[in-house]
Image: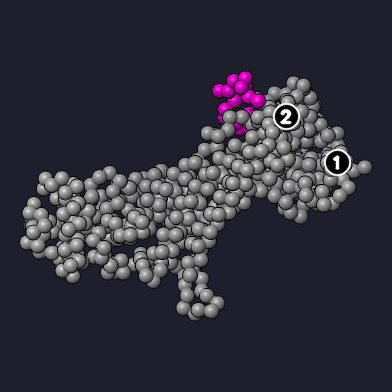
Amino acid sequence: QKPWEHAKSSGSEGDPLAARFVSSLDYDKRLYKHDIAGSIAHARMLLKVGLITDGDLAEIERGLSEIESEIDEQGDAWPGWKVELEDVHMCVEAALIEKTGDAGRKLHTGRSRNDQVATDLMLWLEYDGYVGIQSRWEPIMSAFVDLADKYGHIVMPSYTHLQRAQPIVVGGELMAWALMLQRAFNRISSPYQLRDFFPLGSGAIAGSSLPLDRRHSSQELGSPYWDQLTLNSESSIEGTANRDMALDFVWGLSMISTALSRWAEQWIIYATTEFGFITLDNLYTTGSSMMPQKQNPDMLELIRGKTGQVYGSLMALLTMCKGITIGYNRDLQEDKRHVFAAYDAVCDCLDMAAAIVRTTTFNEERIKAGLNRGYLDATSLAEYLVTKGVPFRTSHQHVGALVRLAGELDRHELKKLTLDEMKGVCDAIEEDVYDWLGPENVVKRYQSAGNAGVSGFEAQLASWKERLGNS
Ligand code: ARG
């Protein structure tokens, strides 16, 4: 009998289909470093409470660190990956037993794969997942800020219902994307908000009759919370049976995807011949196999498209959790598949988005050419009348009449009406009205906090720069 035979699950022994079906090795290999870190913390705790000897611990640490270097070097080719052992936990433990004999056989004292996998996943989220997302914050945010620095003062239309609304500056819109992304990133800013304690030492469900010191293993893993915690409300059942950290993480990823997808959609529209507001770098467009002239925004489309996959992961996790009884159920094994898939997709999308933002140009002439269409300054004119004492509802009606008049006279711009023509509709209008008309004038007049004109954009840009400078 091979030393790891004890580890084989009974159900998978005979039928290779069952062995493959029950195995999570394909995707949970990725946890090996955290599995090893958790095992070392657990072993140190076992020594502290007298369940293993100094010699055992030395052997366990030696064996685990050898295994870690072997996997570092050999990756998927590491001979210890054996599908019939089901998962990363069993593969690492079997290899340890092969290397260290009885010392290795003591490692699983007071432990179950149920608390082990919950711990591993927390460690992965904290040291890989959160860190990986946070490391992508600076590149994407500074890409938007740099682009705004370059093109931010160009006057452009804004859109509600994708119909022309009020004039803004390009930077006003770019800062809106930055804020939307920031809020999404905030949901993934600190795993400490989500984690009270490591489940390590909870065992399979009920805890252990051995004198485990869970505070000690948790401190070994760097949990900052144990000192503040009273352990009284902690539950070994709940600790092994919830996946809230995974759900919170993938929810945050979904919100990043939502932001990126909306932005991608907007820029796909801006890159059309009809709009022509932006030009995407050739690096991030593709041609057509049939139509020689094409420059398709495939990267943006894929950013939008991959959002479905990320939402799918969130739905899969939620659905996985909703039907299980309170205690570990094997359904939970699927959690990692969805966490990793969503994480990989969002990392790719953030990297791609940053590259696109860094290389896109805004076409000032083209934007300017269409700026006088659509009565972008109508709201400004209504506000002008308010400054002349006209109640807003009344001024709104007057401006509506002026827009109709400009159309009837075939002028199509408010500033092309003469003062007399305007006075004919509302005699509160004076010569200074022309300072309130035309998109270039309007964007300078906004003064409310957060406005998308010149003053609001400049304030937002300064605050993002400061924030990035401090990061
Ligand atoms: N591979 C399993 C998972 O990811 C480990 C826990 C297995 N526990 C069990 N009682 N079968 O969830």
User: From where the camera sits, is residue 152 visible?
Assistant: no
Any atom of ligand 1 within 8 Å of the CB at mark 2?
no
Image quarter where the N terminus lies is top right
Examine the structure image and report whether residue 224 is included in the region drawn in magenta: yes
Q: Amino acid at mark 1?
A: Ser
Q: Secondary structure at mark 2?
A: loop
> Residue 239, located in which quarter of the rendered image?
top right
Task: Kindly identify which numbered label has been placed on residue 57.
Answer: none
Q: Is residue 207 left or right of residue 95?
A: left
Q: Residue at x 58, y 23 (%)?
A: 229
Q: Which residue is mark 1?
A: 10
Specify start and end residues of the magenta stretch as a single range.
Answer: 217-235
Q: Which residue is mark 2?
A: 205
Residue 206 in the image: state x and y as whole percent: 73, 26
Q: Residue at x 47, y 54 (%)?
A: 260
Examine the structure image and report whether residue 2 is included in the region drawn in magenta: no
